[in-house]
Image (cartoon, helix red, strand yellow):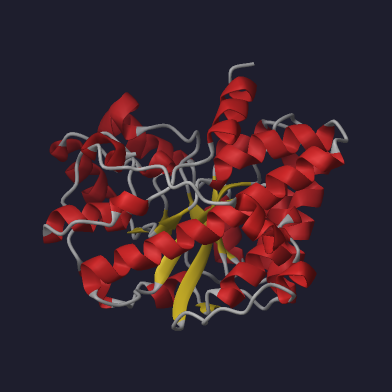
């Protein structure tokens, strides 16, 4: 993350036990009442459809998406899913495509997240653009058939191209082909919790799964609070946020906890297109570094304003260590 280059991150030492109710809406109701934050809007975006999974198990992916879609529908939340079409052949292609159709049938749009989830910094502008074009072979006809417009693109790793000529070439291609970049203004690094959670679920370790869920949701709520403070530092108000989540069993199983967080934070879920009407998203993105960073960090450079890094909190070390162990296997 770019803020680590600034050297200003300080690990906040907070009592996770005090927030352990975050995964349990019933327990949350018994917590000491606190003043409700001011209202704010938020768009929910899910990357890496048809899903991230520790081991290639189609039933697991199917169940994850059914639960995730059910949670969104239950709370009447709008959402968009960003697709890596390269994942379609990772397990059972017909059933992976059926997952995408399930999202569309439920009323949610799909966006392009490239075919192979590659970095423009690694493969260059030309190959990256080819990967974007390859990533719409299935979803564009699906969107057309549903009478919807394929217009949103999300950069993998939030890496938008470096150096500046690479970024400019990609931006020009996207604009010429009718794409809009989906920015991110809240990112709680949920992907880093997802693999340890899958590992616990697949091993039948319910206690460990519960522990990870509680840590994840408590961390997510604190992180949302930090981004709201960051927005105040830049704009003096809450912007309409765009939250990055991933299509994982963790988010499916924690959906009630996530909804409870949004309720406590007084955040109303709106479509991505509506969030993008906020004038904040007209702020130029002049960042062309190699690190994938979210847009409040980018805008802090454009506006020459400091973000409140002193109380930013990184992912807990234990989760990071377990993710790295699993990812290296």
Residue 230 versus residue 105: which sits nearer the camera? 230
Q: Is residue 102 visible?
A: no
Counting from the top left corner in percent of width and height, residue 138 is at: 58, 48
Q: Residue at x 52, y 82 (%)?
A: 36
295 over 321 or under it: above or below: below
The residue depicted at 49 percent of the width and 43 percent of the height is 135
Choose between 286 and 101: the one closer to the eye.
Answer: 286
Residue 70: % across, % down:
76, 66
- Residue that lies at the very extreme toward the left in this rendered image: 304
Asked which quadrant contains residue 314, the reply is: top left
Of residues 170 and 257, the one nearer the viewer is 257
Q: Residue, x 66% and y 44% (percent of image)?
A: 51
Q: Is residue 221 above or below residue 326?
A: below
113 displayed left or right of 125:
right
Taking depth in this image into account, of 229 and 80 the one nearest to the observer is 229
Task: Name the outermost residue toward the right.
Answer: 204
Q: Quadrant of the N terminus?
A: top left
Up-down relation of residue 142 to residue 317 (above or below): below
Residue 18 coordinates in the image, percent (x, y): 63, 58
Above or below, 285 relative to 162: below
- Left or right of residue 149, residue 199 in this image: right
Left or right: where 68 falls relative to 191: right
Residue in view at x 37 percent, y 32 percent: 119
Image coords of residue 201 (percent x, y): 81, 38
Q: Quadrant of the C terminus?
A: top right
Residue 300 in view: yes
All told, the count of numbered labels is 0
Residue 279 sits in which quadrant?
A: bottom left
Q: Is residue 124 left or right of residue 37?
A: left
């Amino acid at each position: 993350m770019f803020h680590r280059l600034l050297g200003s991150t300080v690990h906040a030492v907070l009592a996770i036990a005090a927030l352990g109710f975050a995964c349990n809406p019933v327990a949350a109701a018994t917590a000491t009442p606190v003043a409700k934050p001011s209202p704010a809007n938020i768009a929910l975006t899910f990357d890496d459809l048809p899903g991230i999974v520790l081991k290639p198990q189609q039933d697991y992916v199917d169940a994850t998406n059914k639960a995730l879609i059910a949670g969104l529908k239950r709370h009447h939340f709008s959402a968009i899913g960003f697709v890596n079409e390269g994942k379609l052949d990772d397990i059972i292609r017909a059933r992976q495509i059926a997952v995408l159709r399930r999202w569309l049938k439920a009323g949610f749009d799909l966006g392009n997240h490239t075919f192979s989830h590659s970095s423009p910094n690694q493969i260059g502008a030309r190959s990256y653009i080819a990967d974007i074009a390859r990533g719409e072979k299935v979803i564009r006809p699906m969107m057309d058939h549903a009478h919807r417009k394929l217009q949103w693109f999300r950069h993998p790793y939030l890496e938008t191209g470096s150096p500046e000529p690479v970024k400019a070439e990609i931006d020009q291609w996207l604009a010429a082909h009718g794409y809009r970049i989906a920015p991110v203004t809240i990112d709680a690094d949920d992907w880093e919790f997802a693999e340890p959670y899958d590992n616990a679920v697949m091993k039948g370790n319910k206690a460990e799964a519960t522990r990870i869920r509680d840590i994840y949701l408590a961390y997510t709520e604190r992180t949302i609070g930090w981004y709201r403070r960051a927005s105040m530092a830049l704009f003096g108000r809450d912007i309409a946020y765009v939250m990055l989540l991933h299509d994982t069993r963790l988010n499916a199983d924690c959906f009630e906890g996530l909804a409870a967080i949004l309720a406590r934070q007084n955040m109303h879920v709106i479509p991505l297109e509506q969030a993008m009407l906020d004038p904040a998203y007209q702020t130029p993105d002049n960042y062309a570094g190699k690190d994938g960073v979210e847009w409040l960090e980018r805008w802090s450079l454009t506006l020459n304003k400091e973000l409140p890094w002193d109380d930013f909190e990184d992912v807990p070390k234990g989760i990071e260590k377990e993710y790295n162990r699993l990812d290296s296997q």
